[in-house]
């Protein structure tokens, strides 16, 4: 179910023209073959963040019965998504969108109580590809093994926060 929902979320982000990749421990799990190997709560990084693009995203996700809520954690914005099967039931799996901002020549994300940085060339829209695994589509950098090796400390920052 998680794989289907994250595939729907990636499709909605693509249709809203919001560049994104699967991130954090979800990225590491996906590159080893299982998306939720390390956690059931899937993480996505969105960049070139524009608040006006969130409105069409909200409605396209709502059609798929996925609720998008903005959250502030330690004064930083993130979006929490949850699949709603009915009005009164709550699905315990959730998905988190971390918006990134450009600072100097890198994207800056606030994850795990600290700032992590990714080079803008590595997260360029031309360097992101759609990968299909078991009939589910995910967004990853084209050279995902090199990306994992280069940014492994950043990708683990949600699991091992450094305060």
Image: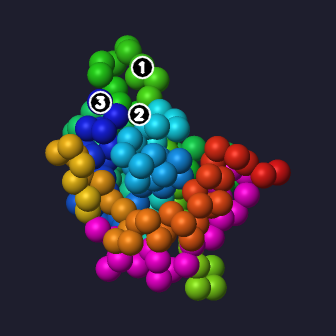
Mark 2 to mark 1: distance in Å? 8 Å
Q: Residue 140's spot in the image, x, y percent?
A: 36, 62
Between label 3 and label 1, give the one nearer the viewer. Answer: 3
Q: Residue at x 48, y 51 (%)?
A: 28
Q: Are marks 2 and 1 in contact (CB under 8 Å)?
A: yes
User: Upstream in the sequence, badge 3 or badge 1?
Assistant: 3
* Furthest-top residue in this view: 88
Residue numbers of the magenta segment: 109-129
The residues tagged by marks 3 and 1 sit, at their Cα atoms, a distance apart of 14 Å
112 magenta-colored: yes
Cα separation, mark 2 vs mark 3, equals 12 Å
Looking at the rendered image, the quarter that the N terminus falls into is: top left
Nearer the observer, 3 or 56: 3
The residue at which mark 1 appears reads as 90
Q: Position of residue 50 (x, y in %)?
A: 44, 67
| Secondary structure category for the residue under label 1 | loop
Q: Is residue 140 above or below residue 69?
A: below
- Tag 3 secondary structure: loop
User: How packed is label 2: few (under 14 Cα within 10 Å), some, or many (20 or more)?
Assistant: many
Q: Circle 2 sits on which residue?
A: 82
Residue 4: mark? none
Residue at mark 3: 1
Considering depth in this image, is 99 or 147 the residue closer to the camera?
147
Ranked by sequence position, the earlier of labels 2 and 1 is 2
């Amino acid at each position: 179910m998680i794989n289907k929902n994250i595939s729907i979320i990636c499709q909605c982000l693509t249709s809203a023209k919001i560049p994104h990749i699967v991130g954090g421990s979800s990225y590491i799990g996906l590159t080893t073959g299982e998306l939720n190997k390390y956690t059931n709560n899937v993480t996505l990084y969105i960049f070139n963040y524009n608040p006006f693009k969130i409105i069409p995203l909200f409605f396209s996700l709502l059609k798929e019965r996925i609720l998008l809520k903005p959250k502030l954690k330690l004064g930083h914005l993130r979006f929490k998504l949850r699949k709603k099967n009915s009005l009164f039931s709550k699905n315990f799996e959730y998905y988190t969108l971390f918006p990134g901002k450009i600072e100097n020549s890198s994207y800056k994300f606030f994850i795990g109580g600290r700032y992590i940085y990714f080079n803008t060339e590595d997260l360029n829209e031309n360097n992101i590809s759609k990968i299909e695994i078991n009939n589910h589509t995910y967004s990853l950098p084209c050279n995902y093994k090199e990306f994992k090796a280069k940014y492994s400390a950043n990708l683990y920052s949600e699991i091992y926060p450094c305060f």
